[in-house]
């Protein structure tokens, strides 16, 4: 090495500078304004299933412990109540903080009317290596288990004709912590894939929610509106889409209310946009069920 340059200096001189933390353009367009927030609130308040047998789609939240499932319900509840609320127990534990499967409705304001959807919160999937044991213990959910009023098996011919469509799940949301995307192990992927297979089989749409984006990227910690500009988050979402085998369009990044005591416009917009995606997916599920029902009636 001539001229007394150290190896580190040569490396520094020749290696390209790291890419800037923000992309040249966002990977998804999103306006963060009061107008958008109000439009989203109105759309959700006035949502109708257009299916006589179901008034409220059931949205099932599944995922690892501490992923932020209960916090997503708390966040939505907070947005509609007008202040931060912690109704569902949330926090960190060695085992799931949520000890049982629970359904929640959200009220539009303290004495307001019930909003037209039901959120189903589950116990977290354990991250140990015993998938099979977990399965037997019921930790890996089978969609029918979440349908206690109308238990039917996957192969049951009555499935599509069952009039109690309202008791079923109409959208499954798999929740991931943005900080653990690179750490997903084979066991966790196996669980995801087994749930995806089951959900596909039943014709239920599957969406992915990525939480804790405020902890994953400094640019986003400083300013949540940078969510779709963050190179790091874009890489994480792309990576997640690839390992899970789901389209990026099915992934919604959010920040849940966790330590704050006041609502925030930017948090609200992301939370409401994620719910809007879920209601649209449920609509697709109803369309699909109606078509299948029609086809079955014709063939019988
Ligand atoms: N900073 C930050 N913290 C979050 C976010 N979402 C959840 N948390 C925190 O993460 C912890 C776990 O959240 P929970 O909502 O209890 O997670 P869960 O998926 O319901 O967990 P289990 O019920 O144990 O399966 C809590 O302390 C939350 O405050 C987020 O978007 N950002
Ligand atoms: Mg929970």
Image (cartoon, rainbow, N blue to C red):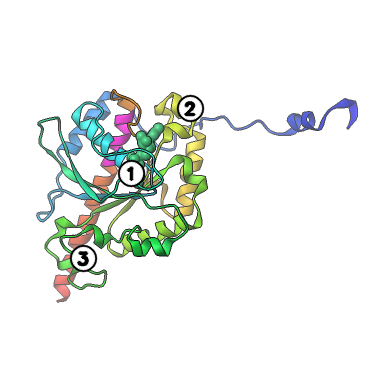
Q: Of 221 and 147, which appears nearest the observer? A: 147
**Disc 3 to disc 2, how far (Cα)?**
46 Å
Q: Report whether the residue tagged 1 is closer than 8 Å to ligand 1.
A: yes
Discs 2/1, front: 1
SS for callout 1: loop
Q: Provide the residue designation for mark 2.
A: 219
Which image quarter: residue 220?
top left
Q: Position of residue 238 (x, y in %)?
A: 48, 45
Q: Position of residue 63 (x, y in %)?
A: 37, 49
Q: Quadrant of ligand 2?
A: top left
Q: Of 176 and 160, which appears nearest the observer? A: 176
Residue 240 can be seen, yes or no: yes
Q: Give the magenta range.
A: 267-275
Residue 69 can be seen, yes or no: no
The earlier-in-sequence mark between 2 and 1 is 1
Q: Provide the residue designation for mark 3.
A: 292
**In contact (CB < 8 Å): disc 3 and disc 2:** no
Q: Split into 4 quadrants, where in the image is the N terminus?
A: top right
The earlier-in-sequence mark between 3 and 2 is 2
Identify which residue is drawn at 28% across, 23% down: 262
Which image quarter: residue 43?
top left
Q: Position of residue 159 (x, y in %)?
A: 19, 68
């Amino acid at each position: 090495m001539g001229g007394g340059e150290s190896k580190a200096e040569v490396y520094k001189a020749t290696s390209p500078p790291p890419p800037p933390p923000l992309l040249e353009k966002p990977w998804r367009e999103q306006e963060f304004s009061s107008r958008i927030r109000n439009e989203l609130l109105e759309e959700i308040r006035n949502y109708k299933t257009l299916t006589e047998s179901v008034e409220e789609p059931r949205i099932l939240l599944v995922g690892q412990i501490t992923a932020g499932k209960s916090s997503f319900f708390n966040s939505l509840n907070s947005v509609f109540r007008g202040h931060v609320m912690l109704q569902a127990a949330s926090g960190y534990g060695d085992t799931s903080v949520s000890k049982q499967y629970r359904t929640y409705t959200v009220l539009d304001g303290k004495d307001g009317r019930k909003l037209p959807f039901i959120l189903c919160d589950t116990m977290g999937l354990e991250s140990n290596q015993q998938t099979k044991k977990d399965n037997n213990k019921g930790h890996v959910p089978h969609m029918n288990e979440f349908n206690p009023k109308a238990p039917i098996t996957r192969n049951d011919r009555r499935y599509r004709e069952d009039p109690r469509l309202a008791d079923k799940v109409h959208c499954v949301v798999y929740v991931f912590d943005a900080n653990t995307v690179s750490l997903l192990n084979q066991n966790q992927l196996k669980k995801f894939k087994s749930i995806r297979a089951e959900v596909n089989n039943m014709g239920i749409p599957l969406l992915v929610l990525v939480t804790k984006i405020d902890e994953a990227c400094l640019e986003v910690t400083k300013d949540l509106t940078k969510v779709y500009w963050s190179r790091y988050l874009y890489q994480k979402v792309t990576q997640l889409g690839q390992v899970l085998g789901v389209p990026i369009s099915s992934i919604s990044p959010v920040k849940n209310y966790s330590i704050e005591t006041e609502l925030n416009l930017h948090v609200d917009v992301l939370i409401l946009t994620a719910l809007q995606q879920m209601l649209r997916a449920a609509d697709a599920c109803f369309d699909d069920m109606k078509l299948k029902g029609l086809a079955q009636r014709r063939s019988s």
